[in-house]
Image (cartoon, rainbow, N blue to C red):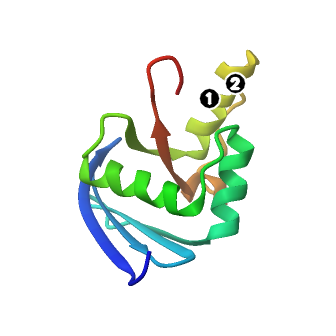
Amino acid sequence: MGEPRYLQTDCVFRPGPHTVRVTLARSTLRVEVEAHGTADLWRGEFDASFIEDLTRKTGNFKQFGIFCSMLESALTQSSESVSLELLTYSDLETLHSWKVGTIIRPPPSTSSVLNTKRYLILVYSVEFDR
């Protein structure tokens, strides 16, 4: 990854269309997601060690360059193995509850900071694993 690369694409996440902008640099990933209907904007900047640590915690470690290539493939829809999801904190709690088989907690109040956060998830699906 020499020169920074900039990608922008429109994606449809619940509840509607969003624009995703990604800047890939040597050791930094910048992400912006903008909701078309509300103009809500979420952004984050992540360094290589954070991404690698995060993928390690998922049990599916990816080097930063590989992760960025997978993200680029998801954005350009050039691979059926990778896709993107935009989740709320409540969505993440529900997924976690299903995974561990626990009772779903009530969602955070609408005034909660957690309610305003969004999580852009890179999903890697292969024949017997997701």
Disc 1 marks which amino acid? Thr
48 or 39: which is nearer to us?
48
The residue tagged 2 is: 97
Q: CA distance from mark 1 to mark 2?
A: 5 Å
Amino acid type, mark 2: Ser
35 or 45, which lies in front? 45
Secondary structure of the residue carrying numbered label 2: helix
Q: From the viewer's perspective, is residue 60 above or below residue 68?
A: above
Q: Quadrant of residue 27?
A: bottom right
Location of the N terminus (image quadrant):
bottom left
Residue picked out by circle 1: 94
Task: Check the image and report above or below for 85 versus 119.
Answer: above
- The answer to whether residue 112 is seen in the rendering is no
Q: Is residue 12 above or below residue 44?
A: above
Secondary structure state at the residue bearing disc 1: helix
Residue 128 % position (x, y): 51, 17
What residue is drawn where x is 64% and y is 39%? 60
Residue at 55%, 76% in the rendered image: 28
Instruction: Residue lying at the far bottom in this picture: please name it.
Output: 3
Badge 1 vs badge 2, beta-carbon distance below 8 Å: yes
Binning the other alpha carbons within 10 Å of mark 1 as few (below 14), some (14 to 19) or many (20 upward) gives some
Q: Which numbered tag is attached to residue 19?
A: none
The image position of residue 54, as x and y in percent, is: 68, 53
Q: How many marks?
A: 2
- Tell me, yes or no, if residue 33 can be seen here: yes
- Crowd class of label 2 (few under 14; some 14 to 19; many from 20; radius 10 Å): some
What residue is at 34 percent from the left and 76 percent from the top?
5
